[in-house]
Amino acid sequence: MTLHDFDSIYREFEPKIRRYLRHLVGENEAADLTQVVFLKVSRGLASFREEASLSTWIYRIATNTARDHVASAATRQQEREQLLVAEEESLDDFPDRAAPGTDHAYVRREMSACIRSIVDQLPESYRTVLLLGEFEGCSNPEIAAILDLRLETVKVRLHRARARLRQALQAQCSLYHDERNELMCDRKPIVVAK
């Protein structure tokens, strides 16, 4: 793949960037922002100077695009409205007890939603390093280059992000291993003080 072969770059990085953006801005916005990122990549490809790796450069563009998007006041209002709609559960969200294996799939979806909601609650500086390191598989030096941070800062933020995630998981979830020895979780009931 040559640096100027946009089609190859798009095929290789589009799924990764979409997944990364989905974690940063949500499912509804990820597809559009992915297209914005690759528009910026295609426009900037001719001037890419290889001071960083291609993946670092693309993830930096994606991170900055997501940050710009989240910073807009109109977007924050729209996200609040979408969150209110998403919180209303329908009967379709619950498993069909007659279908084999449905409980397992339902619990996995719930576990993913639980972890996602906890990650989403982390401060942006922790959430971003955690997503890049744990979900995107970037090395600490790559994260430092993407976010334009010192390596030591990345290490500290990752450590703190993992500690906060672990603490929140223990507070909000009951973790256990199922019959397949896969890690599962159930959300703990919310206790309202009287």
Image (spheres, rainbow, N blue to C red):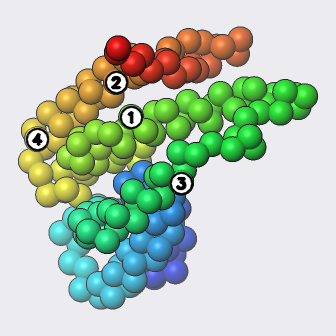
Q: From mark 3 to mark 1, how far is it between C-alphas? A: 19 Å
Which picture quadrant has residue 69?
bottom left
Label 2 amino acid? Ala
Asked if residue 67 is positioned above or below residue 97 in the image, the reply reads below
Question: Residue at image x 65%, y 27%?
Answer: 107
The residue that label 4 is drawn on is 153
Q: Position of residue 82 (x, y in %)?
A: 48, 58
Q: CA distance from mark 2 to mark 4?
A: 22 Å
Q: Badge 2 local density, few (<14 within 10 Å), some, or many (20+)?
A: some
Which labelled disc corresponds to residue 168? 2
Mark nearer the N terminus (1 vs 2): 1
Q: Position of residue 101 (x, y in %)?
A: 81, 28
Identify the element where label 2 is drawn. Answer: helix
Q: Which residue is label 3 attached to?
A: 85
Q: Residue at x 42, y 71 (%)?
A: 33
Q: Mark 3: few, some, or many residues within 10 Å (few <14, many ≥20)? A: few
Tell me if I can see residue 138 in this picture. no
